[in-house]
Image (cartoon, rainbow, N blue to C red):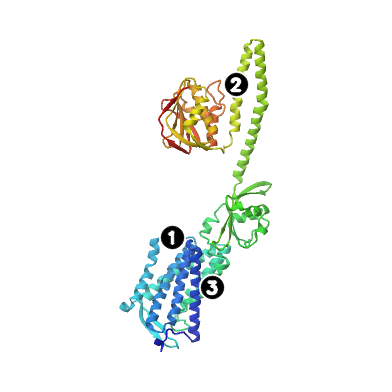
Amino acid sequence: MYQLMPFAMPVDPVPLLFFWGYLLAGGISGGFAIYVLRYRWSEPTARAFGVVSFLLAVWSLAYVGRMLSPTLASKLLWTQLAWVGVAFTPVAVLVFVLHFTGRGRLITRRRLATLCVVPLLTQILLLTNDYHWLFYEDVWLYTGDSTPFIASRGGTWFYGVHIPYSWTLFLIATVLLVQFAFVTTHIYRTQVIALVFGATVPWFVNGTFLAGVRLHPELDPTPVGIAVGMGAIAIAVYRVDFLGLIPIAREEVLDEMDDCVFVIDGAARVIDSNASGQELIEVHGEDSWTAGATVEEIFPAAMRESIADPAAEADGVECELSCGGQSVWYLIRRREFGGLRYAGTIVTLTDISEQKRQQLAVERKNEQLDAVAKVLSHDLRNPLSVASGRIELARAEVENKHLEDAEVALARMEELLDDVLVMARGSQPSDSREAISIEQVGAAAWENVETGEATLQQSGEGIIRADESRLKQLLENLFGNAVEHGGDVAVTVGVLPDQDGFFVEDTGPGIPVGRREVVFEPRYSTREEGTGFGLAIVRSIAEEHGWSVGATTGEHGGARFVVTGVDLQAVQTVPRRTGD
C-alpha cells in the first residue's frame, strides 16, 4: 500500500508530534541561515552561526522528508542528506563558539580541514555501508505504527568514532561558553546563557535517545530539541541582538582600555560599559552606574550634548567636565552598529586633558608673544625712529663722533627688533603652504642678502610644500650666516639623495663639533656684531613645518645645514652658479 502513495503522512500522536517538531526546527534554523546570508555574512562570528543554522536546517528538514517517504530506499536517501547536518554540525558549533569567545585566530584553514576529516569519512562510510557495514550493522523498515519508519543498529564507526568525536567537540564548545559566561558582564552574560541553553538542550535530548530513553523506538528527538534550543537562541538574537553586538575578546580589549566605552541601545539605555567608563560615571555622572539606566539618568548634561553632536560620528567632539575644582577634557566619538537593522551606539571617551592643558599653555604663550611683538613693533620702534631723526638733525648742525656711534647703536637696535619680531610672530605653524621649487626660492632668497663676492650653486631641484615667505626667510638666514662667518664663500643648495630634505653648505671655516647644537639657541653668536637670532629663526621656521634641522661638516670642510623630514620630490637639473 505504501509503495503506491507518493508520501506517508504520520497520523499517530507521537510520530505527528515529531513531524511538526522537525518541521519547526528546520524552519527556525533555515530562517536564521537566510538572515545571516542577507545581512551579516561579512562578519566571521555571524557567518559561523549561519553555517550552524544551515546544517541544523538540513538535518531537521531531511528528517521530515524521511518521515514522508514510504520506502526504505527513499528513506535511506533522506538519511544520507540528514547526516550532512548531523556529522558537520559539531565542527560548525565549535568554530562558532571560538569566534564568539574571541578565539577566532585559532581557526586556520589547515585546522578546519583537519576537523572535517571525520565528518567526511562518515559521509563516505554511510554511502558505502552495504560493502562493509561499519556505519550501520543493520537497517530495516520499522512498521510498528500505521506509518513505516526507518530503523537501524549502529556499527563500529558510529559508536567508536562518530559519537565520541562529536561529543568531544560539543563538550569543548560548551565548556568555552560556560567559562565565558563567568567572566563576561551584563548583556553578554544574557547572550551566553541563552546560547549555552540553546546548545545544551539538543545534545541532552540526543544523549537520552542514545541511552535508550525514548518516546518512540525509532524516532530521534534531537531535531525537536534543536527547535527548543533555537528558540532560546532567538531570544539572544532578537532581544539583545547578539549578532550585532559580539563580545570578541572583551576582557582583553575593553576592560583593559584606558578609554571609556559605553554601549547604548535603541531605547537610549546604557546597557554596558567597561571598567573605565563605570569609574567615570561614578565621578561625573548624575547617578551611580547601573546597567540599563538611560542616558539622561547617568550622563552629565555636557556629555549628553557632545554625544548628540553630529560631529561625534566624524572627528569627535571635545567635552569639558569639572572634577575637584579642575577641568578635565574628553574627546567623544560615537559609532552606530547593527547593520541594516539599527541595534545601538558605541560611545568612546578618550581623556585628552594633558594635551588640552599643553594646548592652552601654548595658546597663552602665543598671546604673550603677540603682546610682546606689538610692544616691539609700535611702542619701541616709534621712539627709535624719533631718536634716529633727532640724530640726523643734530649731524646736520654739528660734526660729532658720538652722534655717529649713537646712529650705529640705533641701527643695531633696529636689527635686533627685526629678529625678535620674527621669533615672536613665527612661533605658530603656518597654514599657507603650497608647492614651491627649492631652486627658485633659493635664487630669490640669494637676491635679498648682501653676499659680496660670494656665489650660489644649486646642484639639484626639488618641489616642496611650504610657506614660501617663511622658507625664503630660512634660506636668507642660512645664506647670511655663511657670508658673515666665511666672507666670499661658495654656497651650495642641494637635495638630499634620499629625497628626505635639502641642505645648505658653504666653504667657510665650518662649525666645531662641540658647538653644532648651541648655534641654534637664541642670542648665541661668535661675532660681537651678530644678533644671535639668525640660526634660532632657522630652527623655528623648520619646526613650524614639522621639519628638523642640524649642523654638520660640508664636503669642503665648511658648515653644512641639513633640513630633514621634508616631503620633497626631487628633480635633477644641471648645476648652475649665481654671482653676487
Mark number displayed over residue 174:
none
Q: Tell me residue 266's x, y (percent).
A: 61, 62
Left or right, residue 27 beside residue 80: right
Q: Earlier in the sequence, mark 2 or mark 3?
A: 3
Q: Nearer the viewer, residue 578 or 287?
A: 578
Nearer to us: label 1 or label 2: 2
Q: Earlier in the sequence, mark 1 or mark 2?
A: 1
Q: Tell me residue 134's x, y (percent).
A: 34, 76
Q: Tell me residue 149's x, y (percent).
A: 42, 84
For the residue marked with disc 1, what is the amino acid? Leu
The residue that label 1 is drawn on is: 106
Q: Nearer the viewer, residue 219 or 471?
A: 471
For the residue marked with disc 3, what is the amino acid? Gly
Give the CA distance from mark 1 to mark 2: 74 Å
Q: Nearer the viewer, residue 136 or 174?
A: 136
Q: How many marks?
A: 3
Q: Regarding mark 2 in the picture, which secondary structure is present there?
A: helix
Q: Earlier in the sequence, mark 3 or mark 1?
A: 1
The residue that label 3 is drawn on is: 231
The N terminus - image quarter: bottom left
Q: Residue at the location (63% across, 41% down)?
A: 360
| Neighbour tally class for label 1: few under 14, some 14-19, many 20 plus, Cα within 10 Å | few
The residue that label 2 is drawn on is: 412
For the residue marked with disc 2, what is the amino acid? Arg
Quadrant in the rendering for residue 573: top left
